[in-house]
Image (cartoon, coloured by chain):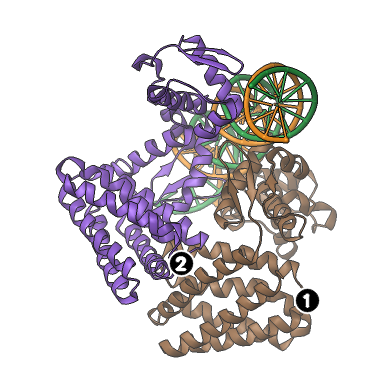
Chain colours: A purple, B brown, C green, D orange
Amino acid sequence: MAKQNTVFKDAFNRCLKLLEQTASLPSEPELGATLGVSRTTVRAILGRLEEVGLLTWDKRRKIVLRKPVAADYFPTEETDSLSEIIERSFMRRILDGGAQPGMQINELELAREIGIGTTGVREFLIRFSRFGLIEKRPNSHWVLKGFTREFALELTEVREIFELRSAAAFAHLPKDHAAWQELDAIEAVHREILADIDNRYLDFSELDERFHLLVHRASRNRFIVDFYDVIAIVFHYHYQWNKTNARQRNARALEEHLAYIAALRSRDPIEIELACRQHLKSARETLLQSIN
Amino acid sequence: MAKQNTVFKDAFNRCLKLLEQTASLPSEPELGATLGVSRTTVRAILGRLEEVGLLTWDKRRKIVLRKPVAADYFPTEETDSLSEIIERSFMRRILDGGAQPGMQINELELAREIGIGTTGVREFLIRFSRFGLIEKRPNSHWVLKGFTREFALELTEVREIFELRSAAAFAHLPKDHAAWQELDAIEAVHREILADIDNRYLDFSELDERFHLLVHRASRNRFIVDFYDVIAIVFHYHYQWNKTNARQRNARALEEHLAYIAALRSRDPIEIELACRQHLKSARETLLQSIN
DNA sequence: TACCTGTCTTTTATCGACAATAGACAGATT
DNA sequence: AATCTGTCTATTGTCGATAAAAGACAGGTA
């Protein structure tokens, strides 16, 4: 079973979505660029489209025969890459409380439970180790350090150092820098969500990540930007896990973001620092509350 | 060829060194603790010692028959673990200038050149990626970002933030904290090396790592301590690579360290910051000089 | 009673194999 | 002349197998 064809299946599904809107398909290289895959995969997709009777395909002549229906799509479980599956599964274990700090992690057991090979698990654990939640004993097992109060405090300490610095750097970006446009776009989404907060408060998680990543990027420092991965993963799963008071929390965070954005626009270092600190403080409190 | 028995060979060699000093061997568990290996490996070592006529071994009765000679040792090439081999080999390529930024990294080619399997290479690259010198294009190759001026500047920026903070925290460690003793020991080695600088200036590299790691540990923050790995590996190979003016550079750094250590002892925040900044500044200059 | 050894099981580290995917090149088409 | 398609090769992602190493447990020995 060497490699799963998840790239193909995922790209196929996205291609079907495209077909729901337009009734024609571009050339192979162009379609590849649109879907972000190689021509090899594009041709596999076209072949499959023909097979299920959605298309006749002869060289440059591609004729769409009908609109795709739900049954044409691959089930979503089959489109996730191995790393996504394993990450989700592993984070659930850690955050759901079934896993105690100090616990040993068994590669083979994990692999069997998730239903993948040991290589995948090993590579995942290595990649995951930079998040500071697990640690390796050489020639022996991994140890779960756990999502503890200390972890949260150490994480937020570094986060605050980095974000304050990045926010200050943001003010010095040239006026025509793309980040300012992105900031406008992000602000607009904030207002949209706030206007319909009761229905859309769960959209905050994704927006939060987009906003803070933009700020961190202003540092132009790969170590600072990379560190944001740690914050992102922790908050991402934290939001999924702890939904108590989510509406209220998110509404408050949205307001803080708006103040923060306004401060960035003012380019006034003092205002920026104040707004940033204010928001970081409540973000930390939120995170800490979820632990005890 | 599943697993190389490098743990066994390395422990065997260290056991021979032990035998050069004492003519008796302790119990299996005790020897295991001394060598840092499991009893399984200890028994393999004892078996081999008997085989080559160094020992008679019957249960608790272990009689050393002769002193080990050079031929008894395993060659050092065989005692390095896979990760050490691959790291050295890879860093040499990057630092020796044979590798241009933007270059693709080919797993199979690397594996063949180093003489190991592809799994080892992949795992190494994943682990190594956190140093910010390479980057993965999913479903495709790794890209070498290179040991460039930008890299050095981004690295030192974060290093300075973290070290200033850690040094400040050092002053607040309780008087009976083990770090103060370690600081004394480190200072003593500094003076020893300075007293014989012409012969021992190359010992500085290891001491440098020991000292700065001690300082970083005072932060009590896993992310700050872990980041020191990045600094350590860069400086480690940098010292090996660039030996021009090494004597002079190291002598200066040793003096700066002594001033830095004195400042830490004073527990005066302002003195600490001054001494720390002074040293970090010349460390950065040294690193940057080696690039252009 | 405390620690040791013999024996056995469990787990990790490493390998090679193979399907999926990317990517290169030459000739075909507009 | 530019872009496309057909075809082929190169490379990655994932698997299961196996020797090395760790570690558990029971019975032996001082």
Against B69, residue A107 (above or below) is above
Residue B270 image offset from top left, x and y in percent? 43, 89
Element at label 2: loop
Q: CA distance from mark 1 to mark 2?
A: 40 Å
Q: Amino acid at mark 1?
A: Thr
Residue underneath mark 2: A174
* Residue under the point 64% across and 78% down: B285
Determine the image quadrant of residue C23: top right
Against A136, residue B202 (above or below) is below
Question: Cβ–Cβ below 8 Å for labels 1 and 2?
Answer: no
Instruction: Pick the residue in front: B20 or A153.
Output: A153
Residue D28 image offset from top left, x and y in percent? 54, 39
Considering the image in quadrants, where does the C terminus of chain B appear? bottom right
Instruction: Pick the residue in front: B49 or A68.
Output: A68
Residue A133 image offset from top left, x and y in percent? 41, 51
* Residue under the point 51% across and 50% down: A137
Count of numbered badges drawn on the protein: 2
Nearer to us: label 1 or label 2: 2
Q: Amino acid at mark 2?
A: Pro
Task: Say if residue B170 shows up in the picture.
Answer: yes
Residue underneath mark 1: B244
Left or right: A271 as drawn, with respect to A215: left
Mark 1 chain: B
Residue A119 image offset from top left, x and y in percent? 55, 34
Against B45, residue D25 (above or below) is above
Against C23, residue B100 (above or below) is below
Element at label 1: loop
Marks 1 and 2 belong to one chain: no
Left or right: B260 as drawn, with respect to B168: right
* Residue under the point 46% across and 90% down: B271
